[in-house]
Amino acid sequence: MVEDAASATRSAEDAQRRRELGGFLRARRTQLSRSEVGLPPRTRGGDVGLRREEVSYLSGVSVTWYTWLEQGRDINPSRQVVDAVARTLRLETSAHEYVLALLGYSTPLPQHAAPVPQAPAHLQRLLDSWDDPAFALAPDWGMLAWNDAYERLYPGIATVDDEHRNLLWLVFTDPYVRELLPDWQATSRRFLSEFRAETGPRLGDPAHGVLVERLSAASAEFRAGWESRDVQRFASRERLFQHPDVGLLHLEHHQLALSDHPEIHVVVYTAMPETDAAERLARLRAP
């Protein structure tokens, strides 16, 4: 009975990943510029959107096979077929890797990652040793630990309920965070695309599904962004924060993985060169 239950769970997870794959391919197919792949505009619809038949022809696969992919059928496309479709749809590296992970062609993250109840003591000591704002993320983007500088940047981190102490939840639901980010619209969508890239292989994890459902119900912006199926790998970049006490902070966003706990990521914000961010951070840290 236990084996039957485990098999049923795996089957349900596989079906969910196939459905996600189908939705992802449809979204990219309908968003792609026809001129980008050498096709003329349609009489109705203009330059945007390819038909299934066109994708299958350009990819060198049968219409039936490609249609089954979009329908989430239980089929096993070869790596060559997946790569051909990715080239046709002009998938960037992160999106291509996302598709491969859904089909099991890359080493995915554990489907059911064990919860990380708290940060290791040595990680908290590392965070506390830094003057720059820093925090640690669990695989589900739960915020495990932070230092004093980060709490001064975002005071709510210490008082929010444990079930809501998740970076994605806070970005999309906390009014303070929305005010803190002058470019909230672009930043929130970037976070969402990175979250999808990182957690895609865990689509069958019930906790992942619950988080997505809760965010979809709580935020129309999250719901629209999730449906767009954008995927993007993390990259260090400049970030802007409009703090109520010290004004505009020009910081650089970095993310690191621990060698002994690779499932935990450390985020640190450092002052951008040739700005007054270092001075403003010092004022933020002052008693």
Image (cartoon, helix red, strand yellow):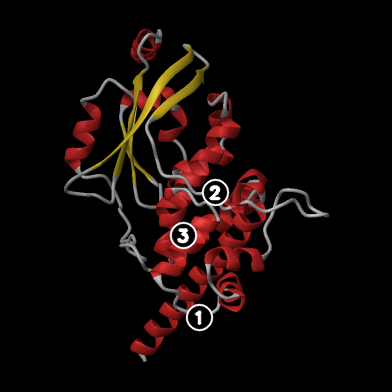
The image shows a total of numbered marks equal to 3
Which label was assigned to residue 106?
none
Towards the viewer: 102 or 149: 102
Amino acid type, residue under disc 2 in the picture: Asp
Q: Which residue is mark 1?
A: 74
- The residue indicated by pointer 2 is 230
Q: Is residue 143 above or below residue 53?
A: above
Looking at the rendered structure, the secondary structure element under dot 1 is loop
The nearer-to-camera label among 1 and 3 is 1
Across and down, in percent, residue 280 comes to 40, 10
Assess whether mark 3 and mark 1 are in contact (beta carbons under 8 angstroms): no
Calculate the distance from the C-alpha at mark 2 to the C-alpha at mark 1.
24 Å
- Earlier in the chain: of badge 2 and badge 1, it is 1
Q: Is 21 displayed left or right of 158 in the figure? A: right
- Element at badge 2? loop
Q: Quadrant of the C terminus?
A: top left
Say which quadrant the N terminus sits in. Answer: bottom left
Q: Amino acid at mark 1?
A: Asp
* Element marked by disc 3: helix
Q: Which residue is mark 3?
A: 208
Q: Earlier in the sequence, mark 1 or mark 3?
A: 1
- Residue type at mark 3 is His
Per the model, the C-alpha gap separating discs 1 and 3 is 23 Å
If you read the primary sequence from the N terminus, does the residue marked by circle 3 or circle 2 appear first?
3
Q: Position of residue 168 (x, y in %)?
A: 49, 44
Q: Is residue 287 visible?
A: no
Image coordinates of residue 116 in percent, x first then y, are 30, 53
